[in-house]
Amino acid sequence: MVVADSPVQTEDVLPVRSRICWGAVLAGAILALALYFFFGLLGSAVGLSIGDRVNAESLGTGAIVYAIAITAICLFIGGYVASQLTTGENKLEGSLYGIFVWATASAMLLFMMASGVRTGLQTMVGLTAAADNTRAVDWEATARQAGVPPERIEEWKAKAKDAPAATKQAAQDPQNQQAATQAARKVAWYAFFGVWISMMAAAAGGYVGSGPTLQILSVSAVRTNTRRVVATV
């Protein structure tokens, strides 16, 4: 047993190095992404099941709310797990672990999206678009099988040829341009609040998952005759 005559300071005992555990952060981020893909596939299955019974506007609004909700829940769980896998952190440090999980998961998700990996919600949108394209290609054959007169089919085809010009004219309409600007502004604000809510959820998960704070206590030496007795906690 070594007894120091001067009081022991914290910096005399702890090594000088980073206290962050990147393994815990990575584990929390991977878990959050795995849960996000799982709930995303669930959302795509539900959306495809009820897509023919609700209008497109209601389905789009529901998809946005669902995406924000599952992102917040998954990152909360990821931040909680990352904080649980570390030791000695206080509440502030636990919240920072959650934010690190959010940043890591966001970077990984952006990388996968740039690499062409589709989430469940993106798959739902892609399948819907593919179904629309298939219906557009087969409509003429379906109309002939249904007994639609050939002159009516030719009339429809002529209108379809004029559709690009009409679409261009509609796009140049000032009222339509203003409506498109308002829609883009709304989407931008939805995206901002979705990211902000997910970051706060990850920080809250890290805060809740933080354990007891590691403390180093200095112990006084007690002199008894010619011997020194050191009590430790």
Image (tube, rainbow, N blue to C red):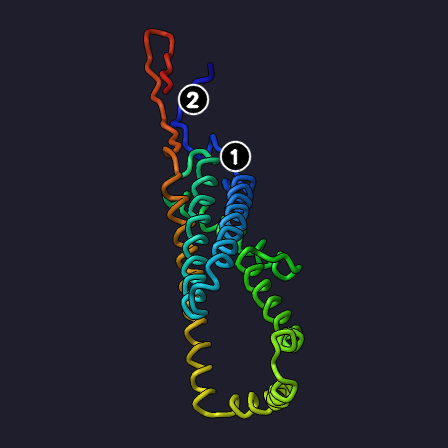
What kind of element bears circle 1? loop
| Residue 210 vertical placement versus 174 (above, below) | above
Circle 2: is it few (<14), some (14-19), or many (20+) Cα within 10 Å?
few
Foreground mark, 2 or 1, reads: 1
Taking the image as shown, residue 33 lies to the left or right of residue 202, namely: right
Question: Would you say residue 159 is visible in this rendering?
Answer: yes
Residue at horizontal 45 percent and vertical 71 percent from the top: 187
| Residue 126 vertical placement versus 201 (above, below) | below
Residue at horizontal 38 percent and vertical 34 percent from the top: 211
Residue 82 rendering spot, x and y as whole percentages? 48, 41
Residue 181 appears in which quarter of the rendering? bottom left
Residue 36 rendering spot, x and y as whole percentages? 51, 50
Residue 59 appears in which quarter of the rendering? bottom left
Residue 122 rendering spot, x and y as whole percentages? 56, 61
Disc 1 residue type (three-letter): Pro
User: Which residue is most to the top?
Assistant: 225
Residue at horizontal 59 percent and vertical 62 percent from the top: 127
Q: Locate the C terminus and report the quarter of the image it occupies.
A: top left
Instruction: Work out whether mark 2 precedes mark 1 in sequence or the reverse, and give the earlier one.
Output: 2
**Circle 2 sits on which residue?**
4
Q: Nearer the viewer, residue 56 or 65?
A: 56
Q: How many marks?
A: 2
Residue 115 rendering spot, x and y as whole percentages? 66, 59
Disc 2 residue type (three-letter): Ala
Circle 1: is it few (<14), some (14-19), or many (20+) Cα within 10 Å?
few
Q: Which mark is residue 15?
A: 1
What kind of element bears circle 2? loop
Residue at horizontal 63 percent and vertical 71 percent from the top: 133
